[in-house]
Amino acid sequence: MPGDEQLQTRGRLVRSLSALREMLPGSFVERRRRCGKPDCRCANGEYLHPQFQVSLLVGGKPRTFNISAELAEEVRRRVEMHKRFRRTEDAICQINLRRFLRREQQKKETTEG
Ligand SMILES: [Zn+2]
């Protein structure tokens, strides 16, 4: 039955969310920049310093936080978790909507029949 399959899929999706509990909000950004010191090897533009940031809205205002190079990979991974969380949330809602609309349809048919 397609309904049972949907429930199985929904259960699998809901369970997969717990693996994303360390998610972080925002967008991960990697930039290359000059530090401004005239004697640094970045001054001529051949070498640029990597700079990692997370951009997000805090209380409706855009904010950017610098991330140390040591933590950059972890933060990148955890921001990616949030994207997966939102895709999973959307999939769960779509299943629930289809199930709800089918129930409404069946109710209508019962009333009319
Ligand atoms: Zn420099």
Image: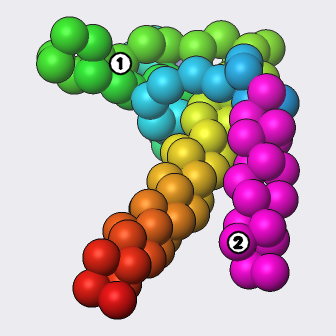
Give coordinates of residue 8: x percent, y percent.
Answer: 83, 59
Query: Relative to the observer, which residue lies in front, 112 or 33?
Result: 112
Q: Which residue is mark 1?
A: 64
Q: Amino acid at mark 2?
A: Gly
| Magenta stretch: helix, strand or loop mostly | helix
For the question of whether residue 77 can be seen, the reply is: no
The numbered disc on residue 89 is none
Is 64 one of the magenta-colored residues? Answer: no
Is 7 one of the magenta-colored residues? Answer: yes
Query: Relative to the observer, which residue lies in front, 13 or 107?
Result: 107
Give coordinates of residue 80: x percent, y percent.
Answer: 65, 41
Instruction: Classify 10 as above or below 50.
Output: below
Give coordinates of residue 102: x percent, y percent.
Answer: 46, 74
Magenta-highlighted residues:
1-18
Label 2 Cα neighbours within 10 Å, binned few <14 / some 14-19 / many ≥20: few
| Residue 56 located left or right of residue 68 | left
**In which quarter of the view is residue 59 placed?**
top left
Which label lies toward us, 1 or 2? 2
Residue drawn where x is 80% and y is 81% of the image: 1
Q: Amino acid at mark 1?
A: Thr
Q: Helix, strand or loop at disc 2?
A: helix
For the question of whether residue 19 can be seen, the reply is: yes
The quadrant of the picture showing ligand 1 is top right
Query: Relative to the observer, which residue lies in front, 51 or 107?
Result: 107
Residue drawn where x is 79% and y is 14% of the image: 70
**In which quarter of the view is residue 20 placed?**
top right
Q: Helix, strand or loop at disc 1?
A: strand
Instruction: Classify 18 as above or below 38.
Output: below
Query: Relative to the observer, which residue lies in front, 89 or 32?
Result: 89
| Residue 110 located left or right of residue 84 | left
The numbered disc on residue 3 is 2
Residue drawn where x is 83% and y is 30% of the image: 19
